[in-house]
Amino acid sequence: MMYISLGGIIWGMKPQLIGNGIRARCPDCGGAVTTFEFDSQNSGHGYILHDTQHHYDRQTFSRILYYLGKCAGCGRGGLAKIHDYGNVKDGALEWFFPMSIESLEVPTQTPEPIKKEFEEAELCASVGARRAGAAMLRSTLEKVLRDHGYTERHLTVNIKNAGEDQVITLVLKRQISDVVKVLGDEVLHQSWREVTEEEFELAHEYTQNILKNFYDYPDTVAEILKEKGRLVEKVNSEEKPEEVKVEGS
C-alpha cells in the first residue's frame, strides 16, 4: 500500500510497533501521530498472553499478546494485538485500536449541521468504513451547495452552476466533480467495491477545500450570490416551526 504526503500530513499512516510502544494516530489528540507507550518492563499497562504456535502473515510465531498502551500526549488507552516469538520488539502488529485518521479543520463559520456531517465522514473512515465516509463527504458537498442557493435536483447541475457563477474556481470544480461526487456516486449507486485509503483521503481534503471556499469568507461569497440572484437556503436555520393548536387542547 502506498502512503503519500499531502500538505505536510501523513496520509494513510498505519500503526507501527516501535520498540516499547505503538506509533499511531490518537483520536483524542485530533488524529495527531503519537506513541502509545507500554511500561518500562515492556509488559504494557495491562496485557493478555496466549502461548500458541501459529502462523500469521506467512510467519511462524509462538505467542499472541494483547497489550494496553498509553498515549504519551493525552493519556488515552489503546489496545494492540501482537504476534511474536518471545520478544515483543521483534513481533508483528496485527491491529491497533483506537483507529483514527487526521481530523481536518473546518472554518469557524461552518454551519453546525454541515460540520457534523463532515466529522461523521471522518468517524466512519477512522474505523475503516471508508465507503460510508465517502457517502458522507458527498452529502457534505451537497449540503454546502444547497446552503448557498444551489438547489437543483442533481448534484452535477449544482456544481456546474456554482462554477458558472464563479463562486468556485475551475480547479475546485474539477476536484469536487471528479473525486468527491464520483466516489460518492459509485458508493451509492454502483456495485460494491473497496474504497481505498488514498481515495478517501483525497476526497476528504477536497471536501475541506469546498468548506473553506464558502465559509472562510462568507461575506464575499454572499456578495457574489446576491449579484447572481441566488436565494440562499440556510441549513443551520434555528427557526422553529409554528405550533399547531388543536381545538379543545
Image (cartoon, rainbow, N blue to C red):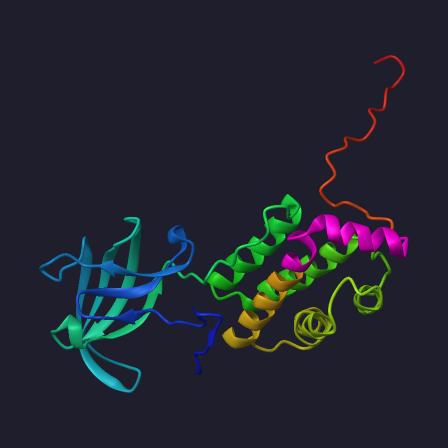
Of residues 140 and 98, the one nearer the viewer is 140
Quarter placement of the C terminus: top right
**Relative to 47, is 75 on the left or the right?**
right
> What residue is shown at x 20% (from left), y 75% (from top)?
91
Specify whether 185 is left or right of 34: right
Tally of numbered tags: 0
Q: Is residue 61 above or below residue 242?
A: below
- Give how far across and how far down residue 3 sits, in percent: 43, 79
Q: Where does the N terminus fall, quadrant-wise?
A: bottom left
Q: Is residue 98 magenta?
A: no
Q: Indicate the position of residue 203 as horizontal and vertical percent values.
A: 60, 70
Residue 70 falls in image quadrant: bottom left
Q: Nearer the viewer, residue 230 or 49?
A: 230
Q: Residue at x 39, y 50 (%)?
A: 28
In the image, taking residue 177 as reference, residue 154 lies left or right, namely: right
Question: Is 109 situated above or below 184?
Answer: above
Q: Nearer the viewer, residue 40 or 164?
A: 164
Is residue 211 in view? yes
Q: Main secondary structure of the magenta part?
A: helix
* Residue 24, horizontal then vertical, whole percent: 33, 64
Q: Residue furthest bottom?
A: 58
Q: Is residue 231 above or below residue 195?
A: above
Q: What residue range appears in magenta?
A: 211-229
Residue at (42, 61) in percent of width and height? 100
Question: Horizontally, is 59 left or right of 3 in the view?
Answer: left
